[in-house]
Image (cartoon, rainbow, N blue to C red):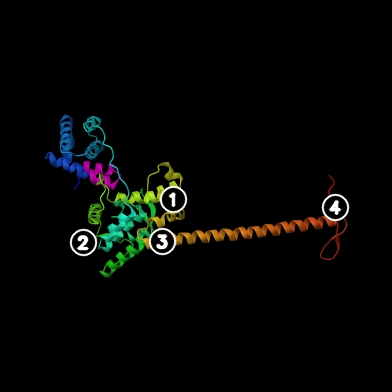
Amino acid sequence: MKSRSVQIFEEYIQSETTKKYYIYYIQRFVTHYNLESFDSILSLKTEDLKEKLEDYVILFKNNGKSSNYIRLIIFAIQAYCESNDKLGINWKKIRRLLGKKQKAKKSRPYTTSEIKRMLHSLKSIRNKALILFLSSSGVRRGAIPTLQMKDLKQMAHGCVSITVYADFDEEYLTFINKEANDALQLYFEQRKHSGEIFTHNSLVFKANYSDVNGNPRPLNEAAISNLILRCKNNAGVNFDKSPNLLCHAFRRRFNTILKLNKDSTGPLIERLMGHDMQLDNSYFQPTPENLFEEYQKGMSDLAIDDSERLMAERETIQAERTQLESEIQHNKNLESRMNTYEKNQEEVIRVMNMIKNGDAILVDMANKQIKVKLKQK
């Protein structure tokens, strides 16, 4: 059973992913100092805890760990202490032991040709579907384990809408293109052929093994990173001085492609990325149709296979042509109505002048003359 301090800490941390990593870092600290439990941290005298933290930081620095990595460990222990009112530690001073914050490593997105090589190196239908899913949707690695069939919805042009982090505060909507959808459907067919029964709650991506009760297990983040790493290495895709780029490079590519479109709308792309726009999230409320329209602007460039890209471009051109033809027809109808209106106006003016000059009179249905009396100014 979890102690009260751990329960309070878990409620204190909002992000499930952050919570998992923080617990891992704290457990390493506990193990390193042979403490009995997390509660033992709170039982330490302030001076004793301070010295242990200082020694811990120096140990990691001497072992060549980056300041950014050590900083995360300190943040984890600090969050645990503060959530349980363990005060008296000068955390700012502890972090100053790290020295200057290291400059973030340079990074870049995958290129289309690199993803193509990665796909060619794979035999697994699931892994191919996963790579196409990541590249066409721009979702984070952490979104994959919780995705269920009910989060998918068929859209036009063979696309599918994806509700990411459904029922959480971070929920947002993005899409995958026809190429990714085709690969996903092939993966589903493979699972059905193996005897799996799909429901609305079925996992979109699952591990290759089940739990003790035979239930599918989610494809966790560590497994996703490992398979992408193997895929990169097998395809000879390596980023110099950027070893940390695995799944996030797909997300960078997604963002870059959409924003390079000359007709792109920045706030809509940020929504497709699931970025926290603070107040904008409350006031700016685009519809799913608005988001899908924005997605389609870069849909062809997101495709990996050349034939899929050409097909997407053709569909985009056809859609633009249809819209243009519709606008032309609308303008013709409007011009025709305006011409008719002008002719009617001319006819009314001609008749009124005839009546004024005595060349015509107004009569009712009984053929009786109707007198028109003009009001004197």
Under mark 3, the amino acid is Leu
* Residue 42 placement, left or right of 315: left
Provide the secondary structure element on which disc 2 rests: strand
Task: Give the residue at x 76% y 56%.
Answer: 346
Between 205 and 106, the residue placed more toward the observer is 106
Magenta run includes residue 12:
yes
Between 264 and 14, the residue placed more toward the observer is 264
Mark 3 vs mark 2: which is more N-terminal? 2
Q: CA distance from mark 1 to mark 2?
A: 42 Å
Mark 4 vs mark 3: which is more N-terminal? 3
Residue that mark 2 sits on: 209
Mark 1 vs mark 2: which is more N-terminal? 2
Badge 3: residue crowd in 10 Å (few <14, some 14–19, many ≥20): some
Q: CA distance from mark 2 to mark 4?
A: 95 Å
Q: Main secondary structure of the magenta part?
A: helix
Between 260 and 293, the residue placed more toward the observer is 260
